[in-house]
Protein backbone atom coordinates (compact mmCIF):
# COMPACT_ATOMS: atom_id res chain seq x y z
CA UNK A 1 0.00 0.00 0.00
CA UNK A 2 2.85 2.40 0.85
CA UNK A 3 4.58 1.62 -2.48
CA UNK A 4 1.42 2.40 -4.46
CA UNK A 5 0.95 5.70 -2.62
CA UNK A 6 4.61 6.62 -3.23
CA UNK A 7 4.24 5.83 -6.94
CA UNK A 8 1.09 7.99 -7.16
CA UNK A 9 2.89 10.87 -5.44
CA UNK A 10 5.91 10.53 -7.76
CA UNK A 11 3.67 10.46 -10.84
CA UNK A 12 1.90 13.57 -9.53
CA UNK A 13 5.20 15.36 -9.00
CA UNK A 14 6.42 14.52 -12.49
CA UNK A 15 3.09 15.60 -13.98
CA UNK A 16 3.17 18.87 -12.05
CA UNK A 17 6.58 19.65 -13.54
CA UNK A 18 5.37 19.43 -17.13
CA UNK A 19 1.69 20.43 -16.87
CA UNK A 20 0.80 19.06 -20.29
CA UNK A 21 -2.96 19.41 -20.48
CA UNK A 22 -3.86 21.02 -17.18
CA UNK A 23 -7.25 20.37 -15.55
CA UNK A 24 -8.22 22.65 -12.70
CA UNK A 25 -10.49 21.83 -9.79
CA UNK A 26 -13.39 24.27 -10.00
CA UNK A 27 -14.30 23.55 -6.37
CA UNK A 28 -10.86 24.73 -5.21
CA UNK A 29 -10.38 27.49 -7.78
CA UNK A 30 -11.85 30.98 -7.74
CA UNK A 31 -12.13 34.31 -9.50
CA UNK A 32 -12.87 37.04 -6.99
CA UNK A 33 -12.86 40.80 -7.23
CA UNK A 34 -12.90 43.93 -5.10
CA UNK A 35 -14.19 47.42 -5.94
CA UNK A 36 -14.90 50.51 -3.86
CA UNK A 37 -18.55 51.49 -3.46
CA UNK A 38 -19.16 54.67 -1.44
CA UNK A 39 -15.56 54.40 -0.22
CA UNK A 40 -16.05 50.88 1.15
CA UNK A 41 -14.52 47.75 -0.40
CA UNK A 42 -17.11 45.43 -1.90
CA UNK A 43 -16.01 41.85 -2.52
CA UNK A 44 -17.49 39.60 -5.15
CA UNK A 45 -17.00 36.36 -7.02
CA UNK A 46 -17.69 34.94 -10.47
CA UNK A 47 -18.41 31.23 -10.74
CA UNK A 48 -19.27 28.92 -13.59
CA UNK A 49 -15.82 29.06 -15.08
CA UNK A 50 -13.89 26.75 -17.32
CA UNK A 51 -10.13 26.70 -17.73
CA UNK A 52 -8.29 25.03 -20.57
CA UNK A 53 -4.56 25.36 -19.99
CA UNK A 54 -1.24 23.96 -20.99
CA UNK A 55 1.52 25.12 -18.69
CA UNK A 56 5.18 24.22 -18.51
CA UNK A 57 7.09 26.21 -15.86
CA UNK A 58 10.38 25.34 -17.56
CA UNK A 59 9.20 26.59 -20.98
CA UNK A 60 6.51 29.18 -20.19
CA UNK A 61 6.54 30.48 -23.79
CA UNK A 62 4.93 27.15 -24.82
CA UNK A 63 2.08 27.67 -22.33
CA UNK A 64 -1.50 28.68 -23.13
CA UNK A 65 -4.51 29.65 -21.02
CA UNK A 66 -8.12 29.95 -22.09
CA UNK A 67 -10.68 30.92 -19.44
CA UNK A 68 -14.44 31.39 -19.66
CA UNK A 69 -16.63 32.76 -16.85
CA UNK A 70 -20.43 32.88 -16.78
CA UNK A 71 -21.25 36.55 -16.24
CA UNK A 72 -24.64 35.75 -14.67
CA UNK A 73 -22.88 34.08 -11.71
CA UNK A 74 -21.67 37.40 -10.28
CA UNK A 75 -22.13 37.26 -6.51
CA UNK A 76 -21.50 40.11 -4.06
CA UNK A 77 -23.64 38.60 -1.27
CA UNK A 78 -26.32 41.24 -1.98
CA UNK A 79 -29.15 39.92 -4.19
CA UNK A 80 -30.44 43.37 -5.14
CA UNK A 81 -26.98 44.60 -6.15
CA UNK A 82 -26.25 41.35 -8.03
CA UNK A 83 -29.51 41.71 -10.00
CA UNK A 84 -28.52 45.29 -10.89
CA UNK A 85 -25.02 44.18 -11.98
CA UNK A 86 -26.56 41.60 -14.32
CA UNK A 87 -28.68 44.16 -16.20
CA UNK A 88 -27.88 46.20 -19.35
CA UNK A 89 -26.16 48.99 -17.41
CA UNK A 90 -23.40 46.72 -16.17
CA UNK A 91 -22.69 43.18 -17.43
CA UNK A 92 -25.76 42.74 -19.66
CA UNK A 93 -25.66 38.98 -19.05
CA UNK A 94 -28.43 38.19 -21.54
CA UNK A 95 -26.49 39.62 -24.48
CA UNK A 96 -23.00 38.81 -23.13
CA UNK A 97 -23.22 35.55 -21.14
CA UNK A 98 -19.44 35.03 -20.89
CA UNK A 99 -16.34 36.86 -19.80
CA UNK A 100 -13.31 35.35 -21.52
CA UNK A 101 -9.53 35.45 -21.35
CA UNK A 102 -7.17 33.99 -23.94
CA UNK A 103 -3.43 34.15 -23.41
CA UNK A 104 -1.08 35.49 -26.07
CA UNK A 105 2.21 35.20 -24.16
CA UNK A 106 3.52 33.60 -20.95
CA UNK A 107 6.92 34.56 -19.50
CA UNK A 108 9.06 33.87 -16.44
CA UNK A 109 9.71 36.94 -14.28
CA UNK A 110 11.88 37.62 -11.24
CA UNK A 111 8.77 37.27 -9.02
CA UNK A 112 7.24 34.24 -10.76
CA UNK A 113 5.40 34.29 -14.08
CA UNK A 114 3.28 36.63 -16.16
CA UNK A 115 0.54 35.79 -18.63
CA UNK A 116 -0.49 38.40 -21.18
CA UNK A 117 -3.70 38.01 -23.07
CA UNK A 118 -7.02 39.25 -24.35
CA UNK A 119 -9.70 39.89 -21.73
CA UNK A 120 -13.18 40.27 -23.19
CA UNK A 121 -16.02 41.71 -21.13
CA UNK A 122 -19.23 42.49 -22.96
CA UNK A 123 -18.16 43.42 -26.48
CA UNK A 124 -14.79 44.92 -25.52
CA UNK A 125 -11.43 43.18 -25.69
CA UNK A 126 -8.30 44.63 -24.06
CA UNK A 127 -4.81 43.27 -23.48
CA UNK A 128 -4.07 42.61 -19.79
CA UNK A 129 -1.03 41.29 -17.98
CA UNK A 130 -1.53 38.99 -15.02
CA UNK A 131 1.45 38.25 -12.79
CA UNK A 132 1.10 34.87 -11.08
CA UNK A 133 2.91 32.49 -8.78
CA UNK A 134 2.95 28.74 -8.35
CA UNK A 135 2.44 27.16 -4.94
CA UNK A 136 3.18 23.44 -4.73
CA UNK A 137 2.48 21.11 -1.86
CA UNK A 138 2.71 17.32 -1.77
CA UNK A 139 -0.84 16.96 -3.10
CA UNK A 140 -1.74 20.22 -4.86
CA UNK A 141 -0.42 22.81 -7.26
CA UNK A 142 -2.06 26.24 -7.29
CA UNK A 143 -1.53 29.15 -9.65
CA UNK A 144 -2.57 32.52 -8.21
CA UNK A 145 -2.40 36.08 -9.45
CA UNK A 146 -3.87 39.54 -9.00
CA UNK A 147 -4.42 42.30 -11.53
CA UNK A 148 -6.48 45.47 -12.01
CA UNK A 149 -8.80 46.69 -14.73
CA UNK A 150 -10.79 49.87 -15.21
CA UNK A 151 -14.46 48.87 -15.45
CA UNK A 152 -15.18 51.84 -17.74
CA UNK A 153 -12.74 50.44 -20.32
CA UNK A 154 -15.19 47.54 -20.73
CA UNK A 155 -18.38 49.65 -20.70
CA UNK A 156 -19.39 48.25 -17.30
CA UNK A 157 -21.52 50.99 -15.77
CA UNK A 158 -21.17 54.74 -16.12
CA UNK A 159 -18.73 57.16 -14.47
CA UNK A 160 -19.82 57.65 -10.88
CA UNK A 161 -18.63 59.44 -7.77
CA UNK A 162 -20.09 56.55 -5.73
CA UNK A 163 -18.60 53.54 -7.54
CA UNK A 164 -14.85 53.21 -8.07
CA UNK A 165 -13.45 52.62 -11.53
CA UNK A 166 -10.56 50.30 -10.61
CA UNK A 167 -11.44 46.66 -10.02
CA UNK A 168 -8.90 44.34 -8.42
CA UNK A 169 -9.28 40.77 -9.70
CA UNK A 170 -7.80 37.79 -7.86
CA UNK A 171 -7.47 34.45 -9.67
CA UNK A 172 -6.68 31.14 -7.99
CA UNK A 173 -6.55 27.90 -10.01
CA UNK A 174 -5.84 24.60 -8.27
CA UNK A 175 -4.89 21.53 -10.27
CA UNK A 176 -7.12 18.47 -10.04
Image: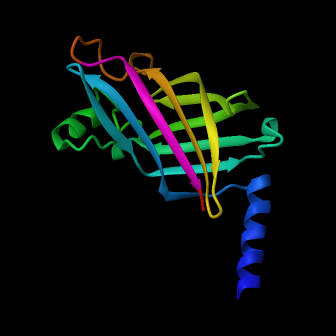
When the figure is inspected, residue 15 is found, relative to residue 61, above or below; the finding is below
Q: Is residue 63 visible?
A: yes
Image quadrant where residue 95 sits? top left
Position of residue 72 measured from the top left corner of the image (x, y, whole percent):
34, 44
The question of residue 105 being in magenta is answered with: no
Say whether residue 164 is magenta: yes
Residue 127, x across and y down, in percent: 60, 22
Which residue lies at the image location 83% right of the left edge and 40% below the top edge?
59
- Residue nearest the observer in this picture, 39 or 10: 10
Q: Nearer the viewer, residue 155 or 176?
A: 176
Quadrant of the frame with the N terminus: bottom right
- Check the image and name the residue furthest to the bottom: 1
Q: Position of residue 12 (x, y in %)?
A: 73, 65
Residue 41 image-quadrant placement? top left
Instruction: Identify the residue at horizontal 61%, vertical 59% (top origin).
Output: 140
Indicate the quadrant containing the C terminus: top left, top right, bottom left or bottom right: bottom right
Q: Identify the image quadrant of residue 87.
A: top left
Who's the residue at 33% across and 42% down the image?
74
* Above/below status of 161 relative to 12: above
Q: Is residue 94 left or right of residue 50?
A: left
**Horizontal and vertical percent for residue 10?**
78, 68
Q: Is residue 9 found left or right of 69 in the rendered image? A: right
Residue most toward the front? 2
* Residue drawn at point x = 21 percent, y = 16 percent: 162
Residue at the extreme left of the image, as rendered: 80
Look at the picture and state if 45 lies above or below 35: below
**Image: magenta residue range:** 163-174
Residue 20 visible in the displayed image = no
The kind of secondary structure the magenta stretch mainly shows is strand
Amino acid sequence: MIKIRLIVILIGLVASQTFAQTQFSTSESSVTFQIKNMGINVDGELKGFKVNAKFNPNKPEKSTFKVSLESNTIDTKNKSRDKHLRNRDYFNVIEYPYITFKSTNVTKTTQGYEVEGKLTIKNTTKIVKIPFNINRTDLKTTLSGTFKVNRLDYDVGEPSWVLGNQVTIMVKCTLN
